[in-house]
Image (cartoon, rainbow, N blue to C red):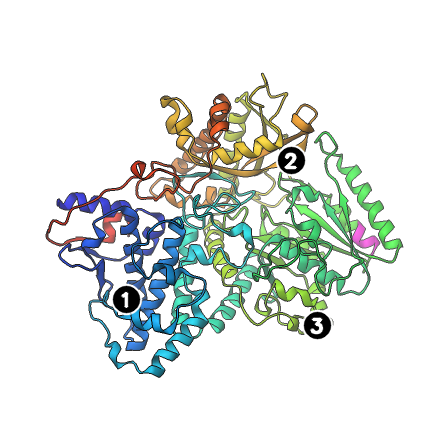
């Protein structure tokens, strides 16, 4: 066994993005003479043994286990019970990691993995049986014989209560939303085609829909998870989560310039926020008519939420419900109307026509004694700001006390000053950390001006909201007593990841933001114009008052149609169904279906915003679609995987990457038939990615190295070897 070969394999595994974040200061020693997978000492030293000299996925499993133990043991002087708790937490976390990285038929590296990855905690007898094995991984094992039967009973009760909170951050983040957050065992991706782990090899311009975490966002979520694990070990998780929820609400208030730090509602998504908006509008007593501006350009569940109905089969609290059924406590006579922005051919109506239609709708509903709840867009999926905000303000003046306005700013492509201006007019604002800020999907918030927040003092929220939210996610008020006393840990961890991106973005001066966006957008629009397979939709420039060094009067969502593969030119665009396939294939490795000279481009994983349906007379079925390439906050603050490049070089890299995405579209069109026949699925990593376990590749094609049992001297790898500081 050569030291350099062994070190190379371990470095491959340590290059896994999530392990790079977890091991900033660990020293790892290799000593094949020990028969255990590893041993950890109290000073965070990790010694890897002979069982780690094998297949990379197994090495990754043991490294993840060792790192978790080392971090939780740092700077502690725990008792026997405390050490036992730490070993159980580390085992549970590592077992859930294995479940994320494997398929059901995979044989786990250790016998306890399936039990510890199960949704239900193990029996007391199993804990007593497995604890000596887990504790043997510590250089100084605790004296388990000192534990009494009552100690074991208390341990089992503690573990049963905390079981659902223990796990890796990438798994915990997938909780507290709905089924769209669930990660496919074979693809490693969720419904949106992204991951809660960093994916630095993928090219991502998907911030109009959802993004995979960057190393920065992952580190933000992981830091909070480790705090949560320590609270779990101390039996203080409930109070910890509630306090951190308050802290996150205060952060968002400060970030968006809201003086009242209690005027924020945390919600699992923009659709959950829409449900909260209806509850608060209904609190005024009159029957409500919701007017949705272009609901086809917002969240798919918004029309149901706007009527007080369940918008999915599972709520953010994990409760199974009947989609479309009225939620308990919401009025059955709530109406929902649509204010369209596009005509039957996909073109935009004149702004004057849109506001005239809106005025008519409001007048008719108010005349019937109804309260109107008007959803306005800043911005839509394709970057539309509508209706005209000045005209909306005039409507509010014409119907005082009869018209509520909520600004759907879930894209968050606006400066905090704009939000302050909206709230000064008494308008509520919905935001997310998931879109422009490139945090994980399903982290939303509702910002309440005083006239909205005051309603919480006089009424009670609909009882059915208990299936969607907890008290600590809302302002302290009598109205929230119907909500539960728990906390959505998945939501909190997602916001922690988004917060890291928001803080990095906020550190860049506004004039620099504007300059970088302008240079990127101009360059990418030029590429699209020169690519005959694509047609850029006319970029709608948001009409806003001018602010010094503002950046949000630029269109940061570039929407374009794609030529149908059988057509000679773009006059016949790709229809919606096949555009969805193209969108998926961009995020898949298609290198096996193109000539050798194109395989590098074909293997690139490219993630764009989901296609938006648009009417088109020449598209198959009369319905075309627009793909969306968006500039997000990371473009400005710097993609962490581009660390080491200067600001100009980073921007040039982003522009070049955008060009590669667009070039891959043309490549897929050129080889449409073989790719369509194979229909490759999106994947977390390309087939050739070293150190990453790919589930849909035959075993003999996976990147792996098997090692013999030869003995060798210990070798130490420090974090400096990984290029970390």
The image shows residue 634 at horizontal and vertical percentages of 46, 44
Label the magenta part by its dominant secondary structure: helix
Tag 1 and tag 3, C-beta contact below 8 Å? no
Depicted 61 relative to depicted 464: above or below: above
Of the pair 396 and 52, the residue shown nearer to us: 52
Residue 497 visible in rendering: yes
Number of numbered discs present? 3
Residue for point 71% across, 62% down: 279
Residue 420 appears in the picture as rendered: no
Location of residue 468 in the rendering, given as x and y in whole percent from the top left corner: 61, 62
| Distance (Cα) linking label 1 and label 2 | 53 Å
Q: Residue at x 74, y 32 (%)?
A: 344
Q: Residue 465 in the image: state x and y as whole percent.
A: 65, 64
- Give the image quarter of residue 343: top right
Crowd rating for badge 1 (residues with CA inside 10 Å; few <14, some 14–19, many 20+): some
The residue wearing badge 1 is 134
Q: CA distance from mark 3 to mark 2?
A: 42 Å
Q: Which mark is residue 613?
A: 2
Q: Quadrant of the N terminus?
A: top left
Which of label 1 and label 2 is nearer to you? 1
Residue wearing tag 3? 457
Mark identifier at residue 222: none
Q: Which residues are magenta?
A: 395-399
């Amino acid at each position: 066994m050569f030291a350099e070969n062994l070190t190379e394999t371990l470095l491959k595994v340590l290059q896994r993005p999530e392990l790079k974040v977890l091991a900033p200061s660990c020293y790892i020693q290799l000593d094949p003479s020990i028969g255990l997978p590893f041993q950890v000492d109290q000073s965070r030293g990790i010694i890897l043994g002979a069982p780690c000299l094998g297949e990379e996925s197994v090495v990754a499993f043991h490294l993840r286990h060792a790192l978790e133990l080392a971090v939780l043991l740092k700077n502690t002087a725990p008792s026997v019970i405390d050490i036992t708790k730490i070993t159980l937490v580390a085992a549970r976390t590592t077992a859930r990691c294995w479940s994320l990285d494997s398929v059901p038929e995979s044989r786990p590296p250790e016998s306890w993995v399936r039990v510890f990855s199960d949704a239900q905690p193990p029996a007391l007898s199993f804990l007593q049986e497995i604890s000596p094995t887990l504790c043997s991984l510590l250089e100084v094992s605790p004296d388990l014989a000192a534990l009494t039967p009552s100690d074991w009973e208390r341990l089992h009760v503690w573990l049963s209560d905390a079981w659902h909170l223990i796990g890796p951050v990438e798994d915990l983040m997938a909780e507290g939303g709905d089924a769209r957050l669930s990660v496919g065992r074979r693809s490693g991706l969720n419904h949106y085609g992204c991951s809660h782990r960093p994916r630095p090899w993928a090219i991502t311009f998907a911030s109009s829909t959802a993004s995979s975490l960057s190393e920065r966002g992952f580190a933000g979520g992981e830091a909070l998870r480790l705090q949560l694990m320590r609270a779990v070990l101390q039996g203080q998780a409930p109070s910890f989560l509630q306090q951190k929820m308050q802290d996150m609400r205060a952060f968002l208030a400060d970030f968006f310039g809201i003086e009242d730090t209690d005027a924020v509602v945390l919600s699992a998504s923009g659709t959950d926020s829409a449900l909260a908006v209806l509850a608060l509008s209904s609190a005024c007593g009159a029957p409500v008519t919701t007017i949705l501006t272009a609901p086809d350009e917002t969240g798919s569940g918004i029309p149901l939420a706007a009527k007080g109905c369940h918008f999915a089969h599972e709520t953010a609290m994990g409760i199974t419900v009947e989609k479309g059924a009225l939620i308990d406590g919401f009025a059955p006579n709530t109406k929902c109307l649509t204010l369209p922005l596009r005509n039957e051919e996909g073109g935009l109506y004149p702004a004057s026509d849109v506001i005239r239609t809106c005025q008519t709708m409001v007048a008719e509903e108010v005349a019937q004694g109804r309260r109107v709840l008007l959803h306005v867009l800043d911005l839509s999926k394709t970057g539309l700001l509508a209706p005209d905000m000045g005209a909306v303000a005039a409507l509010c003046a014409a119907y005082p006390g009869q018209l509520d306005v909520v600004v759907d700013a879930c894209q968050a492509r606006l400066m905090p000053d704009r939000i302050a201006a909206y709230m000064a007019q008494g308008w509520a604002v919905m935001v997310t950390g998931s879109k422009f800020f490139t945090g994980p999907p399903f982290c939303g918030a509702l910002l309440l001006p005083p006239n909205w927040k005051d309603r919480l003092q006089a009424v009670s929220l609909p009882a059915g909201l208990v299936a969607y939210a907890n008290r600590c996610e809302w302002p302290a008020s009598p109205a929230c007593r119907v909500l539960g006393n728990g906390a959505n840990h998945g939501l909190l961890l997602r916001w922690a990841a988004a917060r890291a991106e928001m803080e990095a973005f906020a550190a860049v001066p506004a004039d620099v933001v504007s300059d970088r966006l302008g240079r990127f957008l101009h360059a990418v629009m030029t590429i699209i114009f020169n690519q005959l397979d694509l047609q850029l939709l006319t970029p709608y420039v948001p009409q806003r008052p001018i602010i010094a060094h503002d950046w949000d009067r630029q269109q940061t969502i570039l929407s374009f149609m794609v030529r149908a593969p059988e057509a000679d030119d773009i006059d016949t665009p790709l229809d919606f169904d096949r555009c969805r396939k193209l969108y998926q294939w961009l995020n898949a490795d298609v290198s096996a279906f193109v000539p050798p000279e194109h395989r590098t481009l074909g293997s690139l994983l490219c993630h764009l915003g989901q296609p938006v349906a648009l009417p088109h007379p020449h598209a198959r079925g009369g319905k075309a679609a627009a793909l969306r390439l968006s500039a997000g906050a990371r473009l400005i603050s710097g993609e962490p995987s581009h660390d080491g490049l200067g600001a100009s070089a980073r921007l040039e890299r982003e522009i070049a990457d955008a060009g590669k995405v667009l070039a891959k579209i043309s490549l897929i069109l050129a080889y449409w038939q073989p790719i369509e026949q194979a229909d490759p699925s999106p994947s977390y990593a390309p087939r050739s990615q070293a150190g990453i376990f790919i589930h849909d590749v035959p075993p003999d094609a996976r990147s792996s190295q098997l090692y013999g049992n030869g003995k060798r001297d210990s070798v130490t790898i420090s974090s400096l070897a990984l290029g970390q500081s």
